[in-house]
Image: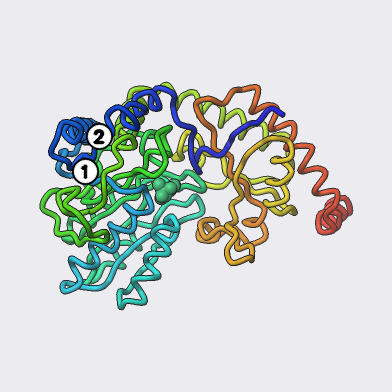
Amino acid sequence: MNRIYFDHAATTPLDKRVFEKMTPYFTEIAGNANSQHYFGREAMKAVDEARDKIASLIGARPSEIYFTSGGTEADNWALRGIAQAFKNKGRHMIISKIEHAAMITTAAELEKQGFEFTYLGVDENGVVDLEELERSIRPDTIFIGVMYANNEVGTIEPVKEVARIAKEHGITCFSDCVQAMGAIPVNVKDLGVDLLSFSAHKFYGPKGIGALYIRNGLPMGRIITGGHQERTKRGGTTNVPAVVGFAEALSIAEKELDENAKYVSGLRDRFIDRVLSEIPFVKLNGHRTQRLPNNADISFEYIEGESILFSLDLEGIAVSSGSACSSGSLEPSHVLLAMGVDEALAHGSIRFTFGKHNTVEEVDYAVDKLKEIVARLRAMSPLFAEIKGEVKNV
Ligand SMILES: *Cc1c(COP(=O)(O)O)cnc(C)c1O
């Protein structure tokens, strides 16, 4: 079967050029970067070069880049590290309602430890409310976190304005840039944030490696204690091949950013245009223009998203459903609910995220299959039969 991958927001395949850069560090140059001999020095040299490259690509200094096991750890560190470092100043933190689970779940943990959270709402396009942000700030607010681009609906957030507001009030500002990095330009100076997370496997780099940018001079607690790695702020033997791959993936992503954005947004727009015009009772979620180049999140009325996902999978097409399967029960996406999408519609949502290796033929094939699947599933839906009856009777 010809397999089609439209789930690039979940993860991307490793770029072959990145793989080639990484391989020597698994075998020939396999020293521990902290060892004081030739093999250690060679490994450390590679790590230093990678750190320099990554820092310069995002407008940071090398000493502001801390490697982590990925976006989840970087998000955890941002929240928990600031909670620890500033708990005597205050215990109130602000994040948006549409943050990734790495943030939402960590916030819930911190609430149990006595921190208080305000969850910022978004409008129907998924854009955070800046006036609500202003109103939510208190003397004891120590953290504001708004993601740069949402992983479900692709909406790009006004992070620069969020950071400006945070700065005016002397509050630490963080942005989860895991989806944005490599897809749209990201520069820490331009955004004005104090902390920023990103992860290599979202831009054709290896899984299990990410980073937290921590502005020099910012007080910061630790969550992983151990050896002296990462300037004693994050213990654990450095994953040298992953770090090397991370830097290479980011430099390729930045070099080819315009070209890729143009290409994948072309695929996305063709997909959206065809779906909206050829399939009845569908709705595009997220901002129409202020969105990631590769994201199309669509609600199909009168059907369960999971049924579409499984049917597409049988046809060899990989997508993601808006609902997350938690503790055996299917809960609708917290992002769509925050945007005011009603629960039934949220259950019928599917995320299609395109990548640089996808083709127009794949898009067209997927739309053709999708039309068949949606028609078939709706034909089996008693609710849809009823609605159709009503439509006809009007
Ligand atoms: C994927 C993702 C994460 C988690 O990153 P991992 O490296 O997979 O742990 C965090 N935030 C957003 C917005 C993401 O898309």
Residue 175, visible in the rendered structure = yes
On residue 12, the disc is none
**Tag count in the figure?**
2
Mark 1–mark 2 CB contact (< 8 Å): yes
Of residues 127 and 257, the one nearer the viewer is 257
- Residue 342, by quadrant, is bottom right
On residue 54, the disc is 2
Residue 56, visible in the rendered structure = no
Instruction: Name the element at disc 2.
Output: helix
Q: Which residue is mark 1?
A: 65
Q: Residue at x 31, y 30 (%)?
A: 25
Amino acid found under the numbered disc labelled 2: Ile
Q: Position of residue 164 (x, y in %)?
A: 22, 51
Q: Position of residue 277 (x, y in %)?
A: 69, 34
Residue at the farthest left position: 217
Q: Position of residue 381 (x, y in %)?
A: 82, 55
Whole-Å distance between the Cαs marked 1 and 2?
Answer: 8 Å
- Residue 28, by quadrant, is top left
- Residue 10 appears left or right of 359: left
- Residue 387, by quadrant, is bottom right
Amino acid found under the numbered disc labelled 1: Ile
Q: Residue at x 51, y 40 (%)?
A: 288
N-term mark: 1 or 2? 2
Instruction: Name the element at disc 1.
Output: strand
Q: Residue at x 59, y 67 (%)?
A: 327
- Residue 88 appears left or right of 371: left
Badge 2: how crowded within 10 Å, few (<14), some, or many (20+)? many
Give above or below for 205 relative to 17: below
Q: Position of residue 127 (x, y in %)?
A: 43, 51
Badge 1: how crowded within 10 Å, few (<14), some, or many (20+)? many
